Image (spheres, coloured by chain):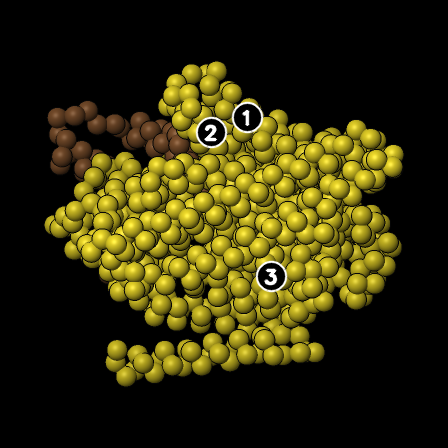
Chain colours: A brown, B yellow
Amino acid sequence: MIGKRLRALLGGAADMGRLMVGVPPYAAYRAHMRAHHPDQPMMDEREFFRNRQEARYGGRGGGRCC
Amino acid sequence: MSIAARLGWIVLALIGALALGIVAIERGESVNAVWIVIAAVSVYLIAYRFYGRYIARTVASLDPARATPAVRLADGLDFVPTNRNVLFGHHFAAIAGAGPLVGPVLAAQMGYLPGMLWILAGVVLAGAVQDFMVLFISMRRDARSLGELIRMEMGPIPGTIALFGAFMIMVIILAVLALIVVRALAGSPWGLFTVAATIPLAVLMGGYTRWIRPGRIGEVSVLGLVGLILAIVYGRNVAESAVLAPLFTYTPTQLCWILIAYGAVASVLPVWLLLAPRDYLSTFLKIGAIAALAIGIVVVAPPLRMPALTQFVDGSGPVWSGSLFPFLFITIACGAVSGFHALISSGTTPKLIANEGDALFIGYGAMLMESFVAIMALVGASIIDPGIYFAMNSPAAVVGTDPASAAAAVSAMGFPVTPGLIAQTARDVGEETIISRAGGAPTLAVGMAHIFSQLIGGKAMMAFWYHFAILFEALFILTAVDAGTRSGRYMLQDLIGLAVPSFRNSTSLAHSLIGTALCVGAWGFFLYQGVTDPLGGVNTLWPLFGISNQMLAAVALTLATVVLFRMKRERLAWVTMVPAAWLIICTTAASLLKLLSSDPRVGFLAHASRFREAAARSEVLAPAKSMVEMRSIVTNDWIDAGLCALFLAVVLSIVVYGIRSCLAARRIDRPTVSELPMVAAE
């Protein structure tokens, strides 16, 4: 029970860390593509990471504050 | 509310009032920093629970049943429904930067009390309200950006004006951030070596995440952190080596050119190579350092040595010139209210919010947290000896460059300090000199080194902690310079695109090089001007930054007011009108003073005419060394004055458009707001 909670907490912290630098969870993307676009090609984890990196830093509004 | 809960809030209110009372009334005896922390946290909790909830439930009427953009437009990439705690971290990391750390340090010259009161009142009534309202407005409109929201609700002209204002803020922010780095690293081989070492380190990390272990951000960040610590430790050897130290010792002007070249090159490199990996380091280091500082203040419980009020509330202070009203309210921008957050709250965050009900926690809550960072920065600046504070933050024109002249000048201000203490502090932190290291970052680094060295390592570790703090600030400032130049370039391409459509959305190399050159040229110009300014540059650039940032906040709050009028909730619109009016008064007063004040330390035009008249008498005033430089100082003053006038024009035109939109909305007896129709969440 405590182990499960701790795992959830650590998982959340890892998600938070990744999202802080612009990478949402790959699992959510995969689940979304399977559920809604099963006919379309799906990026693998490496492509997904590069896509998100480019989206955060390469494009418009790569904003952060002063 | 149950009786127990009610009692709990009453107790909290009493504790908060007690802490505030101790901080405000205690004289003679030094107040412990913990009282400030207790007062701040009590204010935040009460504001969040009562005022925040009132705004969320009554003013905005958040509807948890309404589907958010993340739900309706889910794509697993940009639009992803995200756990509220995870999103809170994301949003906080995006809004918290160097601003809340620097402004309060500069404001400490008036004593800790004015800054503390403005940080607390400003965040509760203005800053957090703005962040929340913009998030709310964007969330109801497919997570559109601030410029688009203004265009939708107020018309295309104010939309363009706001876009232009945002670009100018970007330019000033980049210049002032770069100036802080220059002041911190000039003549500091230890500091410059550690910062320079982050470049090869980031490139190695970039290669690692690109080819060896793609996407392993946690792993690579730990490796990077180890590298950073080694660089700080080895930096001492560099500083002590007769061969290596000169390689990393530069004057402010040389560093200024190095930074401009760096900004130009870094912003056209592929993002995975330098920008992304260093952003990992700077983001995680920032969060870690903020957390450590909070723990440090509570555990060490240092007494405040700065007086509650100093004589400089009259505007004669050496750090920056200008009286408490209006200049305190633009010197502390981030931490109390920051217009730049409106760009974040209408950026990635509204695309990730899973439920409308979370908007209060994220929009209002994260800003309270940023305000707490500002309070800690204020504490950091107030726990060091005031004599050291003024020796570090006064321009060389006032305190000279050696400990004896600095000690004499600062003691004459009424803050007794010995040359020995100034020299000893420099030795403690491993620097040649700490005199005239304006810009806030070095002062905060000394404060942090004080706190951290009492936690771990004692006096022997102080130099390590000082350089750790400098590195942490320089790292995210350089990341901001790099990322800001990129987004400034896009903003510029959008603006030029209004006249020359082919410029917009252009991937052509020529267009992006032109955009980059213009953007770097713009902030480089202000940086050079600041670096060569005898009053240290902070005196010129920080007020311009503050005015522009608060101006954008006034624009965002005006938008929020218009939206409330168009929702036919004008009875509740005082929530945004009061802070908007206050910011409009402050920015208008400050820009008029910057333009027209007869004091050459405050007014740009007065400064220009002082130099012009001297030039007419063929006299050369410091810092100019020739007639050519005299003329360029006059030109710079005119450009700064022009910028101020421009900011004034932006804010006044937005206010006029805002009032017109509100009056138009009042004449119509039904809501005219362009919200997207309600779709129920599943």
Labels 3 and 1: the sequence-earlier one:
3
Is B432 in front, or is B413?
Answer: B413
Question: Which chain is indicated by disc 2?
Answer: B
Write the residue at 43% across / 41% down: B162
Q: Secondary structure at mark 2?
A: helix
Q: Residues within 10 Å of mark 1 (few under 14, many from 20)?
A: some
Q: Between tags 3 and 2, which lies in front?
A: 3
Residue B660: percent from left, percent from top: 35, 49
Residue B236: percent from left, percent from top: 71, 42
Eyeballing the image, is B139 above or below B582?
above
- Residue beneath disc 2: B492
For badge 2, the amino acid type reads: Leu
Q: Secondary structure at mark 3?
A: helix
- Residue beneath disc 1: B518
- Determine the image quadrant of residue B14: bottom left
Q: Residues within 10 Å of mark 2 (few under 14, many from 20)?
A: many
For badge 1, the amino acid type reads: Leu
Q: Alpha-carbon distance for marks 3 and 2?
A: 34 Å
- Residue beneath disc 3: B325
Question: Which chain is indicated by disc 3?
Answer: B
For badge 3, the amino acid type reads: Phe
Q: Do tag 1 and tag 2 residues touch (Cβ < 8 Å)?
A: yes
